[in-house]
Amino acid sequence: FDPIRPSIKRLDDILKFLENPALFINAGNRPPKALLLTGGSGNGKTFVASALHGSVNKQSILLGNNKFAFFSLTPDNFTGWGGAAVRELRSLARAYAPCIIFIDEFHNCNLQSSGNSALLSEFLTFLDDLDKENDPNKIVIMLAASNKPELLDQALYRAGRLGERIHLDNPTLEERALMLETFCKKSGVDPERMNLTHIARITERASRSAMNKICNDAAFSAKAQHRGITFDDFYEAVN
């Protein structure tokens, strides 16, 4: 989470809840049961979902709690199925709770009253039922990702549904510098020997995936020449 932590404080709150859910639930506090991840392509919506899953399970192992199942779905799981798709989703959540359900490209799931109204109705009922059981061992958290949230039906945004958003925009200068620094440390390169601030400045409109590609291209170039990564490798990868 570190390179994008300023953007996802709400997920940090969820992780704190999952450290001791009974403590929160007994006090009448629960995290949002569903979150909508928005932002342009390549800015880490899918990464955030998988990172949350990894963080939750790492935490669960340390605390001796149940591991969370993780289900990643696409619009193909919904189109053509109608309400049966959501009923199947409900059965899946009940059978594998505690779990995290991630639906990518959510705007393509045909969840509009002007489209498949039966499917929308079933899905809204599913969202409304997510937190009816106050059992810490049956928690279901749903994450939906969309780069076109304006296409979603407004009923999905009502309180208790997907009313809470986490927006992931292109990384800031500071975030780009942190991504480069993190990559250098993982690659065994001293960040102090690199002019990472300059690289961060000349990648102003780069998405998070573009920054990852720059790092990987720089590493590949250095590996092909049987040496460590240099500033020139990063510079050539940008250009």
Image: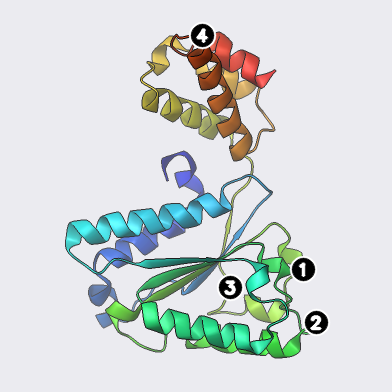
Which residue carries the number 2 mark?
Answer: 115
Please, is residue 3 above or below residue 67 in the view?
A: above
* Residue 207 to residue 86: above or below: above
Of marks 2 and 1, which one's residue comes earlier in the chain?
Answer: 2
Earlier residue among tags 3 and 2: 2
Q: CA distance from mark 1 to mark 3?
A: 14 Å
For the image shown, how many numbered marks are present on the structure? 4
Give the residue at mark 1.
151
> Can you tell which of label 3 and label 2 is closer to the viewer?
2
Residue hosting label 3: 162
SS at badge 4: loop
Q: Residue drawn 66% across and 33% down?
A: 206
Task: Between residue 186 and residue 13, name the one nearer to us.
Answer: 186
Taking the spot 52% from the left edge, 34% from the top edge, the residue there is 175
Tag 3: residue type?
Leu
Which one is closest to the eye, mark 4 or mark 2? 4
Q: Can residue 195 be seen? A: no
Left or right: where 56 falls relative to 11 = left
Distance (Cα) linking label 4 and label 2: 55 Å
